[in-house]
Image: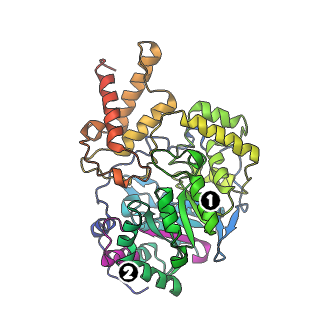
Amino acid sequence: MKDKKNLSRREFLKLAGISAVTATTAGTLYGCKPGSNGEGASAGQPVPAGGMTYRTSATGDRVSILGYGCMRWPMKGNEPDQETVNRLVDYAIEHGVNYFDTAPVYVQGLSEKVTGIALKRHPREKYFIATKLSNFGHASRENSLKMYHQSFSELQVDYIDYYLLHGLGGGGLDAFRTRFVDNGMMDFLLEERKAGRVRNLGFSFHGNADQFEEFLALHDTYHWDFVQVQLNYVDWDHAGQGATNASILYDSLVKYKIPAVVMEPLLGGRLSKLPTYVVNHLKQRRPDDSAASWAFRFAGSLEGVLTVLSGMTYMEHLQDNVRTYSPLVPLTADERTFLEGTAEIIRSYPTIPCNDCDYCMPCPYGIDIPGILLHYNKCVNEGNIPQEGGDENYRRARRAFLVGYNRSVETLRQADHCIGCNECVPLCPQRIRIPQELQRIDKFVEKLRREGPI
């Protein structure tokens, strides 16, 4: 690639449509620590080497069924922990993982850089890199080209294996034309694919079924090499709050014979951090397997799935997923039926479908949106949503909710500061009505606080 003038970090984040000031994520406060609620439960078992399952792409790539999602790299203070990232990448490659998915906007705009540093220490033929054109809100040709070339610089590569148009769906075809067609970027990317600097071209999707069909209908024009969709055993037939059932997305990709890259197989970690009752339900069938392994086996068992992404923050997460896919034991028909019933049980717990993606952040009023929603979900799963009554269980749940809320979310960033500006709503891939949820939680918190000291 020809050398392009490097953007400053502040300019780059502005180009990407995010602020250089990013809120502290709630990941370490809610269920991202190793071993929580059934994840990593098979930690005593050895981690196989050399047993990874692979799928072959249309272009002949031998891709590991486990892909590394680079949106949740471990942090040291406000910066990614490069040393730990290096160790995770080394371990992943040693155990057969060869697909790494990042984006310009991940990890406060630093994911591509730290991923590139970690991967550069390995032979280029050992891994496939996926990244994205995240030109939300800044779709001029100049800005889009800067972002494209910046990805090459940050990743320290001269070609990108899998390049995605980031987050199609919101705004439908009109937004697609604005971001990629009217500015000439689609024509540019098609030429880049011909030249080999982009080896595979696709898109990630968050939208409804009609929009998905509209984008797939462009296959004759653009020849999508792959498409990235949210897919898991709960969303398969029970996607909530305006999201599209994963079964519909999958069936459409099968119809067009387009390989699927799976994102959110764990629903932002929620399918590994389940209520104890659900974990016990799963363990009745496979006592030695983690809750997460069921979700990964579900996604990996589908034909046409090229790779299943996981944002593995901790070594224990990585090891557990390597076990699951070394090799993959496909679900039986009976196990699929069992998971359908499990999905019904999970849906009976009234959690908010937040995946901790941070797309809603930063809030212009400083609210820690993911921290609030994830604390609420944690309390739902642990039975710490106080119900009416004055017995000991009520007092215990009330104390657990309020103490956890104050520890998880700083006072000035709690839900009572939401003014309902709605700027977060169109950014949420899960279509959560965020202001309404924050106001509901705030009323609940105030009710508990009025009852007196904790």
Instruction: Check the image and report above or below for 107 versus 1.
Output: above
Label 1 belongs to which residue?
A: 251
Residue shown at the point (70%, 62%) measured from the top left: 53
At mark 1, the secondary structure is helix
Q: Who's the residue at 60% across and 64% down the image? A: 253
Residue in front for this viewpoint, 304 or 142: 304
Residue 223's x, y, as percent?
55, 76
Q: Is residue 214 left or right of residue 97?
A: left
Q: Quadrant of residue 11?
A: bottom left
Q: For the point 46% across and 31% down, which residue is it?
A: 379
Region in magenta: 124-148
* Amino acid, disc 2: Gly
Left or right of residue 255: residue 156: left
The color scheme shown is rainbow
Q: Nearer the viewer, residue 74 or 63?
A: 63
Q: Distance of mark 2 from mark 1, alpha carbons?
A: 31 Å
Q: Residues within 10 Å of mark 2 (few under 14, many from 20)?
A: some
Kind of residue sitting beneath label 1: Asp
List the residue tagged with mark 2. Answer: 184
- Identified at 37% across, 63% down, the residue is 109
Quadrant assignment for the N terminus: bottom left
- Labels 2 & 1 near each other (Cβ < 8 A): no
Q: Nearer the viewer, residue 73 or 421?
A: 421
The numbered mark at residue 211 is none
Give x and y (percent) for residue 342. Answer: 63, 38
The answer to whether residue 145 is magenta is yes
Question: Residue 442 in magenta?
Answer: no
Which quarter of the figure is the C terminus placed in?
top left
Image location of residue 50, percent across then percent down: 72, 63
